[in-house]
């Protein structure tokens, strides 16, 4: 009887922790999907830009808007407990994401701003500046990766 | 009369040539192109350090080397170096004081550079701001801390050979080979090394798990499965210009620093590099799971 109580008690005590880890694992998977979607938009933009698809230039607005919206939610995707080794799911996020949150948020804001600027550039029909503006979005991605993404 | 004129003409030409040998005209613009192709000599810039003033730790299996100050500061940089000094350093791996450099400084690649390009690079470096910062001693274990071990290493591993002309190849390919092999020194990271730290010739550009700064350097041979065999030439030139991979992801690490400079090259240089790299023999070598980096 005593043992049953002990087992039941431990299950009750441990279950929330396990559930929490599962939830965090889900969150990392969600996070990866979000980043994959951004990757897709960037690839799409570059295909329009460098290929023979000039008539699709207007679509860059849609892709840039999507990037802008997504950049806004990025800071919410890194709650405590979703770092490397904290769940069963691997993550490339460096501890710096949690150690220097202001800088991380700034990096996300840079993506938001450069994407907005890109959309605006296409809207204004300034095709000449396009490559440079796409480059600025790319730099925002890249600089954040340098600081906050582990490479192994 | 005609002979007379001819003689004077010859003498004048000789004089012109002789003076040209002594005082060459600096060409920092050509040098900047070489500098960009060399990835901005980024190993000489430390994190949060002043550009090119050295002190960046370069971790190797033999210990940590610290890059040197290559700004034109006369005391701590290369400001006091002659043309001959830089030529000897870059192409023979010998310092002005006669000591031998460790191969962490890729003179193994730079030995293939033309003298003209090395000197243009010097002209460009000398236009940049001088920074006074003394070089930090290397932190490597015995016996690699002894300079003559570098001499021994060279004896075994360093046999400089110029890039021979290949008449079956295009001009663009030849330019690309020169840039990739001699200037951009792609192989220094993308080719795995043997126990002595020398590049494995059979694994040219096949990727390395022990790349710079503890990073993986991917397989960039055109192997369809483990390399970049599925890429178009355009994919590669676009990466060299922007740092973006064909799937929309962005590269990180040392390569992203180098791309800042490759992106400033004339487009024909990036095209040439892509032409050359995609012409290499494919090597099957799996160094990384592509899905590892998905956020």
Image (cartoon, coloured by chain):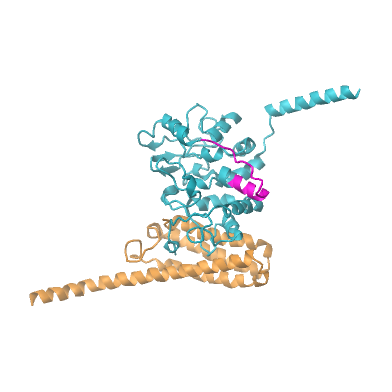
Name of the residue lying farthest toward the left: A1
Name of the residue lying farthest toward the front: B168
Which residue appears at 38% of the width and 43% of the height?
A: B61
Query: Where residue B9 sits: x, y (%)?
Result: 83, 26
Hey, which quadrant is residue B294 in on the image? bottom left
Which residue appears at 72% of the width and 25% of the height?
A: B18
Hey, which quadrant is residue A30 in on the image? bottom left
B121 horizontally vs A100: left or right? right
Which span of residues is magenta-colored?
B159-179
- Taking the magenta stretch, the answer to whether it contains residue B174 is yes
B70 horizontally vs A122: left or right? left
Name of the residue lying farthest toward the right: B1
Chain depicted in orange:
A
Chain depicted in cyan:
B
B254 horizontally vs B126: left or right? left
Task: Name the residue nearer the viewer: B74 or B1.
Answer: B1
Task: Name the residue nearer the viewer: B272 or A6.
Answer: B272
Query: Where residue B84 sits: x, y (%)?
Result: 59, 29
B211 horizontally vs A136: left or right? left
Hey, which quadrant is residue A74 in on the image? bottom left
Task: Name the residue nearer the viewer: A37 or A66.
Answer: A37
Can residue B115 be seen here? yes
Query: Where residue A56 sits: x, y (%)?
Result: 64, 72
- Taking the magenta stretch, the answer to whether it contains residue A15 is no
Which residue appears at 69% of the width and 33% of the height?
A: B25
Query: Where residue A13 sits: x, y (%)?
Result: 20, 72
């Amino acid at each position: 009887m005593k043992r049953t109580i002990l087992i039941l008690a431990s299950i009750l005590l441990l279950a929330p922790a396990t559930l929490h880890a599962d939830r965090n694992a889900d969150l990392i998977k969600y996070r990866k999907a979000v980043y994959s979607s951004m990757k897709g938009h960037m690839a799409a933009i570059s295909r329009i830009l460098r290929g023979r698809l000039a008539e699709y230039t207007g679509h860059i607005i849609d892709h840039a808007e999507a990037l802008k919206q997504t950049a806004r939610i990025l800071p919410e995707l890194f709650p405590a407990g979703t770092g490397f080794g904290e769940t069963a799911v691997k993550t490339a996020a460096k501890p710096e994401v949690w150690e220097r949150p202001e800088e991380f948020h700034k990096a996300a804001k840079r993506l938001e701003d450069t994407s907005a600027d890109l959309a605006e550039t296409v809207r204004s029909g300034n095709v000449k500046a396009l490559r440079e503006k796409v480059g600025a979005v790319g730099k925002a991605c890249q600089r954040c990766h340098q600081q906050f993404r582990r490479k192994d | 009369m005609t002979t007379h004129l001819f003689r004077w003409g010859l003498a004048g030409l000789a004089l012109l040539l002789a003076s040209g040998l002594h005082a060459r005209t600096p060409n920092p613009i050509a040098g900047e192109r070489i500098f960009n192709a060399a990835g901005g000599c980024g190993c000489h810039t430390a994190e949060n350090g002043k550009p090119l003033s050295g002190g960046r730790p370069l971790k190797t299996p033999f210990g940590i080397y610290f890059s040197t100050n290559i700004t034109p500061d006369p005391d701590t940089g290369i400001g006091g170096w002659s043309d001959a000094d830089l030529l000897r350093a870059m192409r023979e791996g010998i310092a002005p004081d006669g000591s031998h450099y460790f191969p962490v400084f890729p003179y193994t690649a730079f030995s293939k550079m033309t003298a003209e390009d090395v000197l243009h690079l010097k002209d460009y470096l000398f236009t940049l701001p001088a920074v006074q910062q003394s070089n930090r001693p290397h932190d490597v274990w015995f016996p690699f801390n002894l300079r003559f071990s570098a001499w021994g290493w060279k004896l075994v591993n360093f046999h400089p050979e110029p890039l021979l002309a290949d008449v079956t190849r295009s001009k663009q390919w030849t330019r690309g080979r020169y840039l990739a092999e001699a200037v951009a020194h792609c192989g220094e990271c993308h080719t795995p090394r043997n126990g002595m730290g020398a590049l494995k010739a059979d694994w040219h550009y096949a990727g390395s798990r022990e790349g710079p700064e503890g990073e993986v350097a991917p397989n960039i041979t055109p192997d369809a499965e483990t390399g970049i065999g599925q890429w178009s030439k355009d994919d590669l030139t676009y990466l060299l210009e922007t740092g973006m991979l064909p799937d929309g992801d962005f590269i990180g690490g040392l390569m992203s620093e180098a791309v800042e400079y490759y992106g400033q090259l004339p487009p024909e240089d990036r095209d040439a590099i892509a032409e050359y790299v995609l012409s290499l023999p494919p090597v099957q070598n799996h160094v990384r799971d592509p899905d590892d980096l998905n956020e």
